[in-house]
Image (spheres, rainbow, N blue to C red):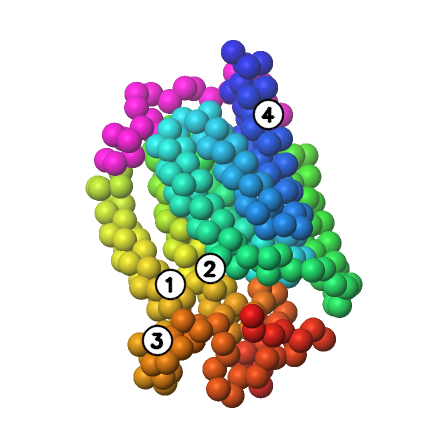
Amino acid sequence: MIPVEHYVALSAILFTIGGVGFLVRRNVIVALMSIEVMLNAVNVALVAFNRLPTHNNAHTGQVFAFFIIAVAAASVAVGLAIVLSLFRIRRTVRSDEADLLKN
Amino acid sequence: MSAIGYVYFYACALFAVLGALGTVGAKNPIRGAMGLLLMILSIAGLFLALHAQFLAAIQLIVYAGAIVVLFLFVIMLLGPSASTPSDHRGRIPRLIGAGLFGATGLGAMALLVSSSPKSTIGPTGYPSPTGDFGSVDAFGRIIFSQGLVPFELSSALLMVAIVGAVAVARGRHKSDPAISGAATLEAENVPHAGQAPRTAGGITREAP
């Protein structure tokens, strides 16, 4: 049985990769994908914590991960709709040119 | 059994990290979506090893089946303008912020690994879960008894998200009275009156 620390370490690595990608990349689509990477990292940690002996027959972590997946689906749908709307107005998907509220 | 478990875990973890790196670092968003798919499949494998069979199936259906396909659909809808050329404006503050974030995350991971109790690390591990832990049966029991209210609220959330996505992405169409009935096909591509081709980032964007 793999100790739960390994899963949490993997989760931290994935979350860091996603966060760095969200901060560095300017493409809005890639930024949304980075957010998905971060949400998946959180899911790994939650499901691994669910395997601790004190929670042997409870599904709390898995239920949390289930709701996170639902929220991720909703956020991707709305985010990609915003990307399409931005592209229709500005003809670009760069996040630094999305300054419609500036002027 | 233990060695096989370790090999399986490290293979899945390696593929997940490679997929995440591909997602973040790919120039072409299509390749980024493929990296995201690789990471999602690897994490579904990890869920299987963690006795979360239902979540593994949900991960495959919702993420690999819906979200990645939605990303690919939008990328192909945008065409070649989905991949943005790289430029170096404002690169230093971005790299400083990303470096701070990465150092914090990896430092937290190093603290976690160094402070974890060594006694639990070993082939003994945790007792195997009893019965149908993680199956659809047990999961559905929890969802429809203790988690009923958040479950119903999540359905409302998804409904609102669908309506919001349709309302945001629809834009102006030929049914809009502001656009005359002539040239309905071009009405979506040609900029509206008063919206000259914009100059953004030093590059003149012109409508096709």
Distance from the alpha carbon under mark 3 to that under mark 2: 22 Å
> What residue did someone put label 2 on?
A80
Q: Earlier in the sequence, mark 4 or mark 1?
A: 4
Q: Dot 1: within a 10 Å radius of its alpha carbon, few (fewer than 14), some, or many (20 or more) residues?
A: many
> What residue did someone put label 3 on?
B174
Q: Are marks 2 and 1 in contact (CB under 8 Å)?
A: yes
Residue B7, quarter of picture: top right
Distance from the alpha carbon under mark 3 to that under mark 1: 19 Å
Note whether B86 is above or below A63 in the view shown.
Answer: below
Q: Which residues are magenta?
A: B117-141
Q: Are marks 3 and 2 in contact (CB under 8 Å)?
A: no
Q: Amino acid at mark 1?
A: Ala
Distance from the alpha carbon under mark 2 to that under mark 4: 32 Å
Q: Secondary structure at mark 3?
A: loop
**Who's the residue at 54% across and 78% down the image?**
A100
Is residue B141 found left or right of B76 in the rendered image?
left
Q: Earlier in the sequence, mark 4 or mark 3?
A: 4
Q: Quadrant of the C terminus of chain A?
A: bottom right
Q: Which mark is residue B165?
A: 1
